[in-house]
Image (spheres, rainbow, N blue to C red):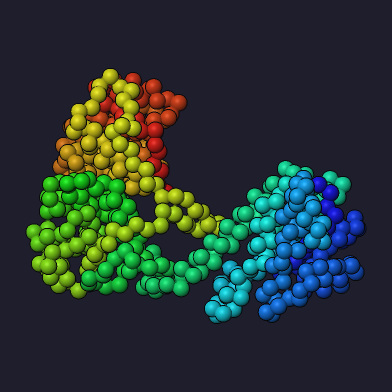
Amino acid sequence: MTIKSALISVFNKDGIDELALELAKNNVAIHSTGGTKKYLENLGLNILAVEDFTNYPEVFGGRVKTLHPAIFGGILYRRDNENDLSELQAHDIPSIDLVVVDLYPFQDTVVSGADHSDIIEKIDIGGISLIRAAAKNYKHTSIISHKGQYQDFTEHYKSQNSSSTLEYRKELAHAAFDVTKEYDTAISGYFASEQVLPLRYGENPHQKASFQGNLNGLFTKLSGKELSYNNLLDVDAAINLITDVSQEGKSAFAVLKHNNACGCAIRDNVAMAFKDALAADPVSAFGGILISDREIDLETAQAIDEIFYEVCIAPSFSVEARDLLTKKAKRILLQWSKEPYSQAIVRTCLNGVLVQERDILNVTSADLSYPTVQKPTDSQVSDLLFADKLVKNTKSNAIILVKDGKLLSSGTGQTSRVDALKQAIVKAQAFGFELKGSVMASDAFFPFPDCVEIASEVGVEAIIQPGGSIKDGLSIEKANESGIVMAMTGVRHFKH
């Protein structure tokens, strides 16, 4: 695609000289606006003003410069479409083969501490529209969307004899949409940050922190001190966990510490569920987060009131339970609306952000396959599925031990799966739990049969795991030797 015309409109002029000079040397018609036009003219180049062919001046202090059919038509028309070519000629629209645009520095303006009105003025409208238009029409138009591409494009342009290849234009389009995505995410994040809840501090007292969002849509705070950064992380983990393990007609209760469950049970009523959840690790439960998927009644509240906890969450509290639990002024009581919230997980990484979907996939009995000779009982299937949901919500590498609808122990955050299993066994034995008849869940496959062998030695009778290792056969063989049921899900649940 030979480049005969270009539109250059950039906020940051650094590095644009070589590209503009190379284009001019090859008789490319360069269109530009405002400050960019003056800058390029100072290089001795002949620059065409955008308003000369839009027949419309820049208005509203430069807010509207390039938003015009004569600009976007020249970018978006299809060079291989006869109707487009006829309309281009009929309306005397100049063709634009290359668009060079960078965006107003919105993120930098936010970071600088500028006031709201200045930040709003740095939301680019024309620039981002030009980028999207050129990227959409990459079959015919090249788009340079940030200054880091100037040199690479210039070298490509020279090597292709004043042209650009389709493959290269597609790469540029991909990069352009990454730019617009990041830019829009930053703007969205800024508006969300207008709902800022200052926190006492971050993970540690020397770190500043705030929550940006709307907690009131999820909770009614009935009592207690202000939520902390760590409280909010634990509350998020608690809601994800209890949502996964809830069963129709049953009560689920969980106790969490540092984003991991230290106790969880499914029982016929809330009081029994709390009792068995607490029993899994009453030591770790000290200062933990409690959550129920059913209303907390007075009996349960009386048991809860005997321990020290940070936050207690439930969809509702009986009047008597609420009266009792609100007597301790510092302990936080949250009434959970059960409203759905964002299915995206966003976290900073290096000089950008990582965005992914929440892991909302839960396997069912229909998803399980059993490669072993031994097949499960109905109660084992129930425990295996419960354990799989627990391991999904536990930091990797993770192993979960379950028996009769109750979490016995977990091995969490270990650098090897064997260490995670050994941690879980030691912990269960320390609290006096009999592991014979228990089931085990692993968040990822077993690369070797060692975990199966260790599990069999302590009485584990069924294992659920994703499968997919090239050595699955060795683990299956070991399970058969030990008379263990193995269920495979085909779904890995890493949690970092």
Residue 429 coordinates in the image, percent (x, y) = 19, 40
Query: Is residue 183 depicted above or below 380 in this figure?
Result: below
Residue shown at the point (24%, 33%) measured from the top left: 381
Question: Residue 96, can we see it?
Answer: no
> On the picture, is 293 further left or further right than 413?
left
Residue 61 coordinates in the image, percent (x, y) = 69, 80
Which of the 4 quarters of the picture holds residue 38? Answer: bottom right
Residue shown at the point (75%, 63%) measured from the top left: 71
Nearest to the observer: residue 312 or residue 83? 83
> On the picture, is 48 further left or further right than 370?
right
Residue shown at the point (49%, 70%) measured from the top left: 191
Residue 83 coordinates in the image, percent (x, y) = 75, 50
Which of the 4 quarters of the picture holds residue 201? Answer: bottom left
Residue 200 coordinates in the image, percent (x, y) = 36, 73
Residue shown at the point (44%, 50%) measured from the top left: 357
Query: Is residue 174 depicted above or below 366 in this figure?
Result: below
Nearest to the observer: residue 243 or residue 129? 129
